[in-house]
Image: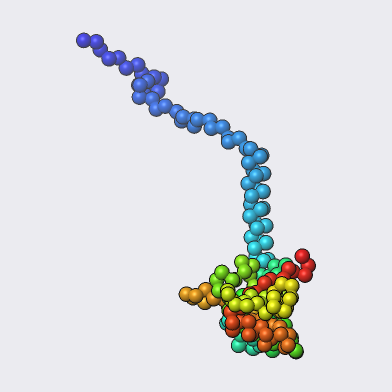
Amino acid sequence: MKECVVTPTSGGIPQSAQVAGPVAPPQVSARRRRPGVIALSLALIAAGGAGVAVLLLQVGDRTEVVTVVRDVEVGQVLTEQDLGKASVALDPAVKAVRADEVESVVGKRAAVELQPGSLLSPSQVTMHSLVKAGEQLVPIGLKPEQVPATALVPGQKVQLVHVPAQGAADPDQELGKAGPQSIAGRVVKASKAAPGTGVVVVDVATTAEAGPTAAAWVSADALRLVLDAPENS
């Protein structure tokens, strides 16, 4: 059996019992900076700040305008109870009546049908009656197959054409007239299609002389409505 020999040091402490000195930490290289990434980060931060600034400006730049709070029929006189106010970020392309101008539209007539929740524009009101002096209003009921695909709007020019019922004599032909008789008119209002029947009632303004004739054609179901081409077409 071999003997274990411990060699003493000069200090009297065995060599195997000496304490090791401090260990140096491993060298960690610093992360390499990337100028492109830093520049991109700064650009994104700047863009985000600019976007927030623009949003705050848009929210702050609001305009008080007039709104419609209940249904208003064509030709109906506007009252204060028909109108309200709202604060909106108004696009310059949108023409709306300002809240401080509400008195200028009260007492005028609706030129078109007004819906609740919509902004009121100057072109939607008129100070004139939709039926002028010397005119008469003739209501015409149109069946679904007689309603034009083009929407009927107030002010549209139309022709009221006399079309005798099938099998009935045509007085225009007996008098030797070329083509059917017609009366010029102007749409004042067109209702929505009635549930179930789909009938649309159109109020047409005609001259006072032609009004009774047009009404007689309607009563005999001998009238058809024909749209005139727009004046600027």
Residue 124, percent from left and from top: 69, 78
Location of residue 213 by image quarter: bottom right
Residue 194 left/right relative to 8 = right
Identity of the residue furthest to the right in this view: 232
Location of residue 60 by image quarter: bottom right
Q: Is residue 174 above or below residue 56?
A: below
Identity of the residue furthest to the top in this view: 1
Identity of the residue furthest to the left in this view: 1
Residue 211, percent from left and from top: 69, 86
- In this view of the protein, can residue 69 be seen by the observer? no
Q: Is residue 50 above or below residue 64?
A: above
Residue name at image x 72 percent, y 79 percent: 175
- In this view of the protein, can residue 48 be seen by the observer? yes
Residue 86, percent from left and from top: 63, 77
Q: Nearer the viewer, residue 131 or 136?
A: 136
Residue 102, percent from left and from top: 69, 84
Q: Nearer the viewer, residue 112 or 181?
A: 181
> Where's the C terminus, which quadrant?
bottom right
> Where's the N terminus, which quadrant?
top left
